[in-house]
Image: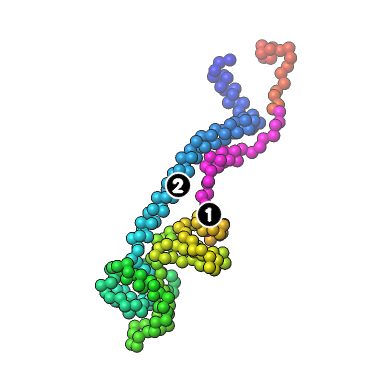
Amino acid sequence: MGDAEMKAKFLDAIKDPETAAALEAVLAPMVAAAVKAAMESKEEEIAVLREELKETRAKLDDLEQYSRKNCLNISGIPETVGESTAQLVPCTVGVTINQTDIDTCHRVVRQAAGKPPTIIVKFARFDQRQELHAARRQLREVAAPAGGRFTTQQLEKVFVSDNLTQHRQSVLYAARQLRRKGKLFAAWSDVGRLKLRVTRGGDTKLITSFDDLRDIVGGDPDLPCADSVAHPAAAAADSVAARVAPVPNVPIERPAVSKGKGKRGAR
């Protein structure tokens, strides 16, 4: 039998459903094992790269937060047509602030429905920023001056907070959601550092990530899930194996061959 004839017979054989199923049952575990072995050699490298990426992101977040050190958010100041925020802030917050104390300030573009846009103020010196931040708890007790631009009721809604990076805003928001659920006693920011207490009078803990919150309170729907694929090698092998349905060990029926007749007699 020549190679071409042998190849043709083999192709005809694997077209048979039972033959194909038997081959798949034999080959699928071998393929899955080969894929798993190939991926496992990369898992350690992937783990190292993930840790380096995590550290890089943390360092970038620290640098961005440091650049915001002299900044504060002031929320609740009513917006007026043709306003100058640099002139608006000093007459609203109840703390003596000169024009030269402010490096720059502006309202954010995005805003919550029905609320005036937050004003971001960057002070010329850190101590000026701290003076306003330290007095933030007394701001709601400030009475509106006679003939002033705002009423006492409007000034009561003014709120001063740290200007945080997007990552730290998300972590602090999640911590405050946990506080509302009773899983934490308090959560706040202090010059960009995120702090919390689990119980009244308990130790103050520093947090920097969702992982820190997860270590403290455990799993919670308000915390983002961990990496979807923690072990890529196992996931890849399982993916291959899942595509192969179990095949019962059924003997393959072969056509009967008449005894006493060779190929010549069969013609």
Q: What is the three-letter code of the residue carrying label 1?
A: Cys
Q: Picture quarter containing residue 49?
A: top left
Measured from the top left, where is residue 20 in percent x and y? Answer: 62, 31
Q: How is the image coloured?
A: rainbow
Quadrant for the C terminus in the image: top right
User: Residue 257, relative to residue 160: is it above or below?
Assistant: above
Check if residue 10 falls in the magenta segment: no
Q: Position of residue 146 (x, y in %)?
A: 34, 88
Mark 1, residue position:
225
Alpha carbon separation for disc pair 2 and 1: 17 Å
Which residue is found at the position 34% from the left and 77% from the top?
A: 95
Q: Is residue 235 left or right of residue 138?
A: right
Callout 2–callout 1 Cβ contact below 8 Å: no
Q: Residue at x 32, y 67 (%)?
A: 126
User: From which residue to which does the magenta span run?
Assistant: 223-251
Most frequent secondary structure within the magenta stretch: loop
Left or right: 139 in relation to 23: left
Q: Nearer the viewer, residue 21 or 97?
A: 97
- Is the residue marked by circle 2 packed among few (<14), some (14-19), or many (20+) residues within 10 Å? few
Q: Residue at x 60, y 28 (%)?
A: 14
Residue 51's label in the rendered image is 2
Label 1 element class:
loop
